[in-house]
Amino acid sequence: AQRVTQPEKLLSVFKGAPVELKCNYSYSGSPELFWYVQYSRQRLQLLLRHISRESIKGFTADLNKGETSFHLKKPFAQEEDSAMYYCALTHTGGFKTIFGAGTRLFVKA
Amino acid sequence: DAGVIQSPRHEVTEMGQEVTLRCKPISGHNSLFWYRQTMMRGLELLIYFNNNVPIDDSGMPEDRFSAKMPNASFSTLKIQPSEPRDSAVYFCASQISGGTGELFFGEGSRLTVL
């Protein structure tokens, strides 16, 4: 069965510290992985997707098929990174997208 | 484009009442999704449509929930009768099937059932 697991509900770090939001998935086929972010009073929006291999707002995520993980990382957290982050999975070329339970990141000054 | 539009933004109702949530997807998007967001379970997929046809409704909690998409520009999610445990934020999202896979979300409808 498809499943996305985000083990941390809340992650609190100091400004300037590295941050890693964990995501593990369970899927038998060929998945596409995404990270979405929801800032306060804003819509849920795409942050990045694994196929683009891009860095957005200093965040990167590498798909590790061996460990079935797609952790989100940033070397130096900023206060404006405080938000709710969701890891999501969809089948390559498919429609159904499922999300993890989300991790709230709080970056302290 | 104003993006995905949902209404109402907030709804407070009493247990047993019927609730109807509405969604207008982005023009040209042919897939539409309904999600429910709670603190405990995060974002749960309830149902999704492709070209106005329901593809997978396995996430719909029970028969009290129903969803329709009568045309490409409108969808409803109905709860009848509503219960306090239905209190959550309900999101609608749209997508171009066969595209990048990105979902575009509405601002959500916050439902409180007393």
Image (cartoon, coloured by chain):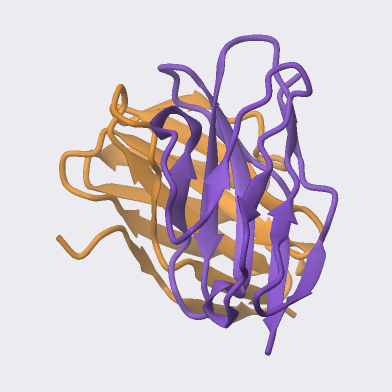
Chain colours: A purple, B orange
Residue B85, horizontal then vertical, whole percent: 79, 64
Residue A42, horizontal then vertical, whole percent: 44, 74
Q: Is residue B48 above or below residue B81?
A: above
Q: Is residue B41 above or below residue B28?
A: below
Residue depicted at x 68% and y 78%: A107
The front one of A3 and A22 is A22
Residue depicted at x 44% and y 25%: A95
Does residue B74 appear to the left or right of B84 in the view shown?
left
Quadrant occupied by the C terminus of chain A: bottom right
Q: Is residue A79 above or below residue A4?
A: below
The front one of A98 and B61 is A98
Residue depicted at x 42% and y 73%: B8
Residue A22, horizontal then vertical, whole percent: 75, 46
Q: Residue furthest top?
A: A29
Determine the image quadrant of residue B45.
top right
Does residue B61 appear to the left or right of B1 in the view shown?
right
Is any atom of residue A27 visible in this view? yes
Is any atom of residue A102 visible in this view? no
Quadrant occupied by the N terminus of chain A: top right
Residue B14, horizontal then vertical, whole percent: 69, 78
Q: How many marks?
A: 0
The front one of B67 and B96 is B96
Residue depicted at x 53% and y 39%: A34
